[in-house]
């Protein structure tokens, strides 16, 4: 007797990397960044609803593997993500990820998807949502320090959502800058390669730092940051990894996603435990002040939080219908009689008889 | 230009429910239970190596969704599992699960698999490993209270690993017992249906309780447990869910997997925080005593720990080669130039031109 066909419940829609890339092209990358940004902002507004926990990290000498779960009471989501700075040298991604949504009522998964591409999109969307609330009005120029895998996504989100027109580019490896310029050619941004971070920061209203070394580096030193700028510090975060001189933190008003996580992983790990920070959800809901003067330095110490992945997963789920850009994965055992798991397994015997 | 083919690294071998069932038949269910038991015991012996954390639970009115990560420093694993006792009434599984192994050195996943079937196998294998160390010598009869989805697996593991020959069966629903008897017919066990838990416990050297109500129930009352027995209490565990009268706990020597998790979820949640327990890995490695007398009641307060899933995942990975019982999932974005994620996405444009 052959295995009976699994019921519909047993199948989980799966979005492969190939299908995610097709989805990006179908929607358009800028439109998708704006769409995800709307979901990210919506979930910041619903912040208090969420079941929040710092990511669950397993550290090793070479990197970290993390699980980032959250739930809004109706839907549960989590992301698996690694961070291995040394991977690039071996031709691998520093960050790879996949994610899942499940129905809280049944506990059954309802979506599995690649999230390497999606994480780059959601990180950029989040940076742009934050900059929309904190950057100086009429910001038009952004310095982009670090021109790696995340940089183009950051640039396009800042263009689409915050009206950035000019990028001033710096990377310790000029080839990375060349790659960025090739990739963003013809997308409506003026691209200015620079010879130093100092040069890149000149005339910029937004400074984005996005580097990946696992060490306390000083990508941005104190004298490079003038009054009135917004700093978007989103480089791969973990304990022992920072990008900014502590002097900048002292001069800035610092905004974060979820303080218990940021104090461990973010730039503020350099500062005392009671260093004052403002939670972004409070700014977005009007419960806390964002930018209050033209001379103020605002600093988004972004580390990436589970709710942002949740927002991106929700967005993908809502866009999938009718696209055919997924396939059904036979991931859940779902016997006709839920108490008869053993019988289901036995009836699936390809030989039709008894097993050894 | 069509999308370039992803590199081999980008593919994650995926074992569907259908392929897991085929694997069970290819190996044979009893042989597979013994094999997993060997891996479980091996990982108990390596206990101190593991990165251990209580499971990360998201509770709701209807149930719980949990992530169970662990790592031995070389391989990382986690399981997603839900527990929704009300699901059975709606024709769904109380427990569904899937799991993943990843390479600690790169952070790249190396195996994704269904784990609903595999969890039943590893839970039974673990119970049998524990019973092998704690049950009275020459135990031949087991009472099985609760004849649901886990029961046949428990029975076969106890037969194969501990030499159990007779099962005394009780379930509040006689149909569950009938199902079990149908499923285990011809597998070398004497099956004795009983009209009450008391009757089932008569003459049994091992008593297995395996029920799933989300409440403090008394499946086993104090007067039902005579001297010298081994109790295998493995019913679906969460805060507020117990199966045993506290009097039994007081009379027993209690053995657990990982105390920080068991004190929250297990039978011992009824007891004071300093209630003495012995960790199974210490018994298995000879660092603590197990059964010391014929009159002693040993109690395994099993809640299921991440290392056991890790063992089962390792077993499956080691069995897969050459079977063809998996397919490759395009789950990881893996551009030729790891810094050029954006370029990879753009080159995948099915239209071959610019996106909107």
Image: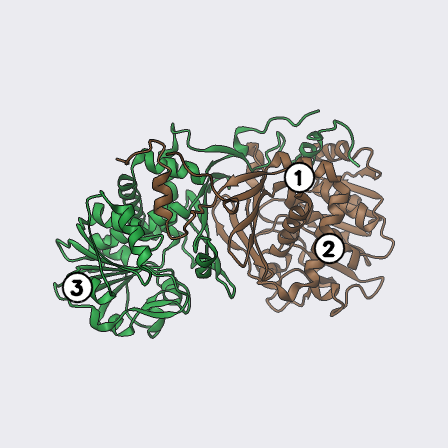
Chain colours: A green, B brown
The residue beneath circle 1 is B149
In the image, A16 versus B222, the foreground residue is: A16
Q: In 3D space, how far apart are the residues under numbered discs 2 and 3 (Cα atoms)? A: 78 Å
Q: Of circles 2 and 3, which is in front?
A: 3
Chain letter of disc 1? B
In the image, B81 versus A201, the foreground residue is: A201
Q: Of circles 1 and 3, which is in front?
A: 3
| Residue shown at the point (75%, 51%) measured from the top left | B128
**In what element is the residue under mark 3?**
loop
Residue A174: x and y in percent read 30, 59
Q: In 3D space, how far apart are the residues under numbered discs 1 and 2 (Cα atoms)? A: 26 Å
Residue A189: x and y in percent read 20, 48
Q: Is residue B47 above or below residue B129?
A: below
The residue beneath circle 2 is B222
Instruction: Look at the numbered discs 1 and 3 and tell me whether their residues touch, using CB distance below 8 Å.
Output: no
Q: Is residue B273 above or below residue A78?
A: below
> Residue A202's mark?
3
């Amino acid at each position: 007797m052959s295995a009976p066909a699994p019921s519909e419940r047993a199948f989980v829609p799966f979005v492969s990397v190939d299908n995610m890339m097709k989805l990006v092209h179908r929607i358009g990358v800028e439109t998708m960044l704006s769409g995800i940004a709307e979901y990210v902002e919506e979930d910041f507004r619903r912040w208090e609803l969420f079941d929040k926990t710092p990511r669950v990290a397993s550290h090793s000498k070479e990197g970290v593997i993390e699980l980032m779960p959250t739930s809004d009471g109706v839907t549960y989501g989590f992301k698996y993500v690694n961070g291995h700075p040394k991977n690039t040298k071996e031709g691998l991604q520093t960050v790879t990820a996949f994610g899942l949504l499940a129905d809280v009522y049944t506990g059954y998964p309802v979506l599995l998807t690649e999230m390497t591409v999606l994480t780059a999109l959601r990180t950029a969307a989040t940076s742009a949502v934050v900059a929309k609330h904190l950057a100086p009005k009429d910001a038009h120029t952004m310095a982009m320090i670090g021109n790696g895998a995340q940089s183009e996504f950051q640039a396009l989100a800042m263009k689409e959502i915050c009206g950035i027109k000019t990028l001033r580019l710096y990377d310790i490896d000029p080839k990375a800058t060349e790659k960025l310029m090739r990739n963003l050619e013809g997308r409506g941004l003026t691209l200015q390669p620079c010879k130093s971070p100092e040069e890149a920061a000149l005339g910029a209203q937004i400074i984005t730092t996005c580097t990946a070394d696992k060490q306390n580096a000083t990508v941005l030193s104190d004298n490079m940051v003038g009054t009135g700028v917004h700093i978007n510090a989103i480089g791969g975060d973990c304990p022992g990894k920072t990008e900014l001189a502590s002097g900048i933190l002292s001069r800035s008003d610092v905004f974060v996603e979820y303080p218990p996580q940021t104090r461990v992983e973010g730039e503020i790990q350099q500062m005392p435990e009671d260093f004052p920070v403002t939670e972004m959800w409070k700014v977005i809901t009007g419960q806390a002040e964002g930018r209050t003067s033209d001379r103020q330095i605002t600093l988004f110490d972004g580390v990436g939080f589970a709710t942002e992945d949740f927002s991106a997963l929700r967005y993908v789920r809502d866009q999938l219908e009718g696209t055919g850009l997924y396939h059904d994965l036979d991931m859940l055992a779902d016997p006709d009689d839920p108490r008869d798991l053993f019988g289901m397994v036995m009836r699936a015997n390809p030989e039709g008889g008894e097993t050894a």
